[in-house]
Image: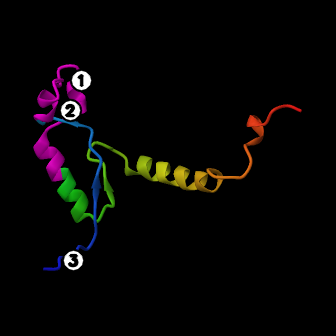
Amino acid sequence: MHIAYTHETALITGASSTEIWERSGGGLDHVPAQMVMEVEAMVNSALCGFDLGETVTLPSLPDVEDWNRLLAARAALGPNLSRNQPAPRYRANA
């Protein structure tokens, strides 16, 4: 059987109210309530992101342009992340 996908979506979640917190011995008591998303809302957001064709879905991020700016900054760094010499600020004074 061959299954063809039209696209894939990565889901980047924050804290969600799942049992994993209790199973890990932690719990959510120390996490502010405004930072914890209900599972149903998380799943619905993930499905909406998939339907929208998003490559990455961040359910709690209000402004998608924040994500786009991060990606642009990362791309701009790319050519400078691997060079044969240290940056001038790291060279020893002669």
Looking at numbered disc 2 in the image, what kind of residue is underneath it?
A: Val
Q: Quadrant of residue 18?
A: top left
Closest to the observer, 61 or 74 = 74
Residue drawn 31% across and 61% down? 54
Q: Is residue 15 above or below residue 62?
A: above
> What are the residue bounds of the magenta stretch?
19-44
Q: Earlier in the sequence, mark 3 or mark 2?
A: 3
Q: Where, quadrant-wise, is the C terminus in this rendering?
A: top right
Tell whether label 1 touches label 2 (CB within 8 Å).
Answer: yes
Tell me the residue that label 3 is attached to.
4
Q: CA distance from mark 3 to mark 2?
A: 34 Å
* 62 in the magenta segment: no
Q: CA distance from mark 1 to mark 3?
A: 41 Å
Tell me the residue that label 2 is attached to.
36
| Residue 76: image tag | none
Closest to the observer, 2 or 77 = 2
